[in-house]
Amino acid sequence: MSNPTSLSHPPKPLTILHTSDWHLGRRLYGQLRYHEFEAFLAWLTQTLQQYEVDVLIVAGDVFDTMTPSNKAQALYYEFLGVVSKSHCDHVVVVAGNHDSPTFLDAPANVLKALNVHVIGTACEDVADEVLVLTDSQDQAQCIIAAVPYLRDRDVRSAQAGESGADKDANLLAGIHEHYAKVAQVAKAKQAKLIAQQQRHIPLIATGHLFAAGGATTADDGVRELYVGSLGKISADMFDECFDYVALGHLHVPQKVGGREHIRYSGSPIAMGFGEANQTKQVLLVQFGQNLASDSLKERVQERIEEASTASQIPTAPQISAKPSHTLTTPAAGAAANSSQADLFCGDLFDDWLEPTANQPSQLQTHADSAADSISQLDKQHKPDEALAAKTLHITADNTMQIIAVTVPCFQQLLPISGDINHILQSLQQLPHTKPIWIEVAYTGDEIVSDLREQIHAAVAGTPFEVLKIKNHQVRNKVLKAQSTHETLQDLDEMQVFERCLVANKVAESQRPSLREAYAQIVYQIHHDDSMAE
């Protein structure tokens, strides 16, 4: 990371908001979720205004599919239209693996007139991915290396007889080379601007990729970006010139390789029940001079302490009529109360998760008791509740700080796992004040022939809706073949293929090559741009 301490700084700090993985249009067990997406975008608009954000970065997976619905498209374009009229000077959007590159690129020239910069496809000339953003006075604010999701074909050429290890090495080399070229162009532009303006110009990179050792959840819908375990990068791949790296793809907020300035913002909405107990967030990154010295920080700290005494989560500070332009949250080193610390467990992965390079961590998601079920709901903050902001990192010279702002929960999700007594007890103890979507996993030893009837009777007349009832453990004991009562909704593509291999009695010696060939086909289906001509 570059060191700006010897250079002068602009009088007004630069504030960037980093978000990703919206997955507009995504369903949960067939349930439409547009009310959540609409509420999130409305909240994000208010947050941009509240913190007087200068640049918004969306690091991929704007949509859930390459052919988004009309409703999903309308939400996206309406949001961009509103933001273009706000205080926010620029919006930078890069494509993720779920997005159609050509679909995002199609209106790019029109959106550019609104200061919305879209990079859907990796550019043949990497210089086109390096954006110099300016303010209303035409002064450079920052440089964005807007790198989208790099598809296999973008960074390497397939070669006959290439082994899996060769593919992995060539793919990683191609990704590294692409970022190295982008960094070279960006550094040249930065040096020129520094010479002209005699102050540090922040350099930010984007990416949509899978970091080695990244934490995931069991049902977050995060696809493998490449066939097998290829393409998992390390923090060392990013040039030290980047002041901040805004990543997308993983839905759990986390930093990469212990580097404070390389981060995933995570998805703003729980994409599955495995994410139900996560605190969702967006990241504010601010560049300026002496960011920790603002006296308003002390007043915000007092508000947080008062809210803690009242057992409430503090609100993020309101912007005054004459804002100080310095984000106001508790200092990074300040002692936090236990309830507030729990909110930001995503930044503590280095302490309590130990993922390996080959096996990403998965988080425990199901409640073990009725009390745990209530506790899970308590951690999901409703839109009308006060929210918290926390400083995750501030540099030693006080020229950059990273702040997490909690995203409210717009639809409560609750996974319940246990025997029938535990399930019914948990349902009975739930508060009837809010609609809750529930996933039930029956793990008892007894056969309960009327399991569904009992569960649906327990939620009758309540605002609860049971979206899924899983009973695989009993099926395995009662039925010799689990697949007899499986549905396609219960399986992914590879699991269906495995069932076919078993059903057709394919020899074990032939299965590895067939799995690899099938994985290639599935990869092409997911990643070929159906919107391209």
Image (cartoon, grey):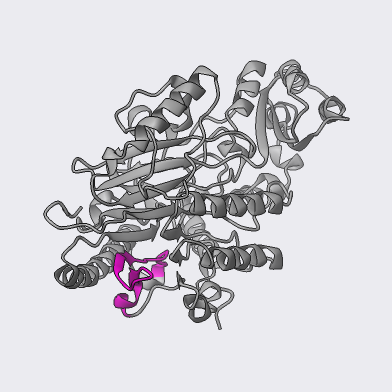
The span picked out in magenta is 125-152
Residue depicted at 52% across the width and 49% down the height: 47
Residue 510 to residue 185: above or below: above
Q: Quadrant of the C terminus?
A: bottom right
Please name whichever residue, 452 or 352, is drawn nearer the observer in this view of the structure: 352
190 vs 251, left or right, is: left
* Depth order, front residue of 106/499: 106
Where residue 221 sits in the image (x, y, percent)? 56, 49
- Identify whether 487 is placed above or below 306: below
> In the rendering, at what x and y percent does residue 150 appear?
39, 66
* Residue occupying the far front of the picture: 322
Location of residue 123 in the rendering, given as x and y in whole percent from the top left corner:
37, 76
For the question of whether residue 354 can be seen, the reply is no
Whether residue 367 appears in magenta in the rendering, the answer is no
Quarter residue 69 falls in = bottom right
Q: Position of residue 136 (x, y in %)?
A: 38, 70
Occupied quadrant, residue 71: bottom right
